[in-house]
């Protein structure tokens, strides 16, 4: 009898960022590290391309949403971000 293992859908990450943001660069490195353990789909959005997004996120970036739920912003700790993926 074959064992059926339900495959969990890949999480979707939305990453709000902008060039020249060192916190964003650090957050992207953390996301890359997590991707080696937990595969996910990534949408990276430069907030400078949309004035409404720029106004909404300019003092908060980097902002990371996991399946449309805000999980981290600003100064992000790796342990907090990794825990969000495991939750």
Image: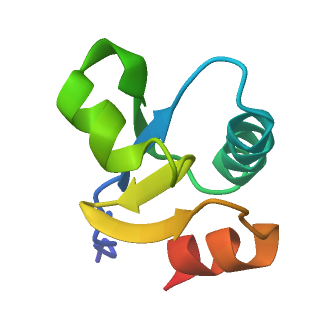
Answer above or below: position of 45 versus 80.
Answer: above
In the depicted view, which residue is nearer to us: 6 or 22?
22
Q: Quadrant of residue 73?
A: bottom right
Answer above or below: position of 5 versus 38.
Answer: below
In the depicted view, which residue is nearer to us: 16 or 11?
16
On screen, residue 78 versus residue 56, left or right, reads right
The spot of residue 31 in percent (x, y) is 66, 46
- The type of colouring in the image is rainbow
Q: Residue furthest bottom?
A: 87
- Which residue shows up at 28% across the image and 71% down it? 6
Answer above or below: position of 18 versus 32.
Answer: above
Work out whether residue 46 can be spotted.
Answer: no
Q: Quadrant of the N terminus?
A: bottom left
The spot of residue 4 in percent (x, y) is 28, 73
Q: Quadrant of residue 47?
A: top left
The spot of residue 24 in percent (x, y) is 68, 38
- Which residue shows up at 42% across the image and 35% down it? 42
The spot of residue 26 in percent (x, y) is 80, 43
- Which residue shows up at 78% across the image and 77% down it? 79
Work out whether residue 33 can be spotted.
Answer: yes
On screen, residue 8 versus residue 29, left or right, reads left
């Amino acid at each position: 009898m074959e064992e059926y293992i339900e495959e969990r859908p890949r999480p979707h990450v939305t990453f709000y960022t902008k060039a020249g943001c060192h916190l964003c660069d650090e957050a992207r490195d953390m996301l890359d590290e997590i991707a080696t353990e937990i595969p996910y789909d990534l949408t990276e959005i430069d907030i400078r391309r949309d004035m409404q997004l720029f106004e909404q996120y300019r003092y908060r970036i980097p902002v990371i949403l996991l399946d449309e739920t805000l999980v981290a912003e600003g100064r992000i700790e790796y342990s907090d971000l990794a825990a969000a993926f495991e939750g």
